[in-house]
Image (cartoon, rainbow, N blue to C red):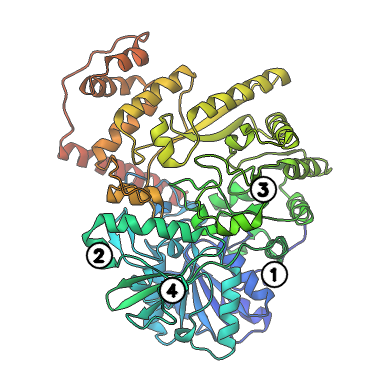
Amino acid sequence: MKEYKLSDFLPTTKKELELRGWDELDVILFSADAYIDHPSFGAAVIGRTLEAAGYRVAIVPQPDWHGDFRDFKKMGRPRLFFGIAPGCMDSMVNKYTANRRLRSEDAYSPDGRHDMRPEYPTIVYTKILKQLFPDTPVVLGGIEASMRRLTHYDYWQDKLRPCILCDSGADMIIYGMGEKPILELCRQMEDGYMINDINSIPQTVYLAPKGNVPNASTTTGDIVLNSHETCLQDKRAEAENYRHIEEESNKMHASRLLQDVGTSTVVVNPPYPPMTTEELDASFDLPYTRLPHPKYKGKRIPAYEMIKFSVNIHRGCFGGCAFCTISAHQGKFITCRSKESIIKEVKQVAEMPDFKGNLSDLGGPSANMYGMEGRNKKACEKCARPSCIHPNICPNLNTDHSRLIDIYRTVDAMPEIRHSYIGSGVRYDLLLHRSKDEAIDKAADEYTRELIKHHVSGRLKVAPEHVADKVLQLMRKPSFQQFRDFKRVFDRINKESGLHQQIIPYFISSHPGCREEDMAELAVITKGLDFHLEQVQDFTPTPMTISTEAWYTGYNPYTLEPIFSARTPEEKLRQRQYFFWYKPEMRRDIERSLRNLNRPDLQKKLFGNMPHYAVGPTRQPSRNENNRATDNSKKRKEKKRGRNSRD
């Protein structure tokens, strides 16, 4: 592998600027993640994109936001603007579990440290920069700002928040994948435009004085949303907004969105059209080292360890899952890398000194959407569906897996590759779908066999998410019967091939529409399939998803019908317990819950053949007991962190 010098990375210090002979910067990016020079990390992508266009750019990773703010001052003032890249994950999802408990580690920080980023770094970093450099524009990017571009529910504060421009004081948001809008912003600023005068770049958000929005007119296609103040008073109005927000995020030709907040109007310009293959190749072919910056030598960055031997082959996802932010960020239209670009990156991975011949993932937002698009492009241009495969697979969608099979086989034929595994989620509904084209159906069967025989590292992870059809409809996931059908195929191919692989299903509790009885049914059905569930999670409301808005407002944003959600910690815990029915210590509480539900039939199905455990009187833990348990848990974690730091 090529030996990289310090100057091969984007500069992070004054010393590194001097190595390049630079005395001025055009753009300075502040990242809440460690700096990993890899196409899976947003700050590196934007930095390399600007560098390729001739701009002088630096990255300040995880600046210290305490004390004298020296990290914010060390690079000086950029010629064009500061950029905020708050991280690959929303900072609050990264930091806390669904129960608002601190996660065991920060996957995007060296050695998983928790103290390297603040909560809401977008807001914290911007306020510091505006304090130090009040006249220099600040531009927001990344998932945190993208998903907070309009009024949204914040689960961790348990309240509605306005567009993040209002809370941060920044000048503009670039939402979604930002290569094209950030280059256009630089070009316009180079032409002498002040940032307050730049209002027509696609995929950007800015604040305009209320009543003075440039070119405002409902006849030109603008959609006026319910104001922030209205949404604060009326949850139904908030739910109503989100049908428009989601649909316009996923259209080929979208409308501009306007929302009043205080004395301003938030203006969300429509997104750019999907990137072409040539444009996506150009982004992935930039001169990434694919390594963490040398400053992290000897330190483990968990997120990097997970993806260091993986290759992303496309962007976009047309699944439209109601709880997912991928389509809101990347869009539903698939853009594929060329075969040549993919092979080039695989060769780069193979040259890494610790590569043992195994690719951990050859995938994307979904594993098997590569090469798929609408047959009739004009129909796609008029489409407003958030999902191309729910409630059924669009007849215009070409579901041919042939190009993906060719990618797999070409990679596997490379002498440097022993195995290429598929770590991304597989959409089995695409594999089971029968079209009117026998060749496409044959390719789906061929892909399924290829996947199971050659690309599973012992366990194939898929995501049915639930068993109840009414819940799956709200999630925009296929019927659980399709999982049963796919499992039969999986088991048959394993048996025919002499393999002993497992299929590992993911499930979610407490999703809107899910009641405790639905979770009990889930336990019974998965027991019947001989699953002891491991890959499970409690629903976490994250900004700008349809599921989150339904959970907060109590309304389905598409029908405006009332919808039940388990909202209290007690309700959520009662649902989650059914995942672990097989643990003896859970039986008492589950049996008590089933008695309260008057469902002795489910109790018999779950525990009929198991040894009986006496069930004590119903008693909820007192607040003091809960507090003591939390305090003891905190003390154990602090003690553990202390040992780790001493080591």
* Inter-mark Cα distance, 2 to 1: 51 Å
Q: Name the residue under label 1.
A: 8
Give how far across and how far down residue 138 sits, in percent: 45, 78
* Inter-mark Cα distance, 3 to 2: 41 Å
Task: Find numbered disc 2 in the image and state the secondary structure of the residue it sits on.
Answer: helix
Which amino acid is tagged 2? Thr
Residue 475 visible in the shown view: yes
Which amino acid is tagged 1? Asp
Q: Earlier in the sequence, mark 4 or mark 2?
A: 4
Which amino acid is tagged 4? Thr
- The answer to whether the residues at label 3 and label 2 have Cβ atoms under 8 Å apart is no
State the mark number for residue 219: 4
Q: Please tell me how crowded label 4 is: few (under 14), some (14-19), or many (20+) other residues with Cα within 10 Å.
A: few
Q: Mark 2 points at which residue?
A: 230
Residue 108 visible in the shown view: no
- The answer to whether the residues at label 4 and label 3 have Cβ atoms under 8 Å apart is no
Question: Closer to us: mark 1 or mark 3?
Answer: 3
Task: Find numbered disc 4 in the image and state the secondary structure of the residue it sits on.
Answer: helix
Closer to the camera in the image, 550 or 397: 397
Q: Please tell me how crowded label 1 is: few (under 14), some (14-19), or many (20+) other residues with Cα within 10 Å.
A: some
Q: Which of marks 4 and 3 is nearer the N terminus?
A: 4
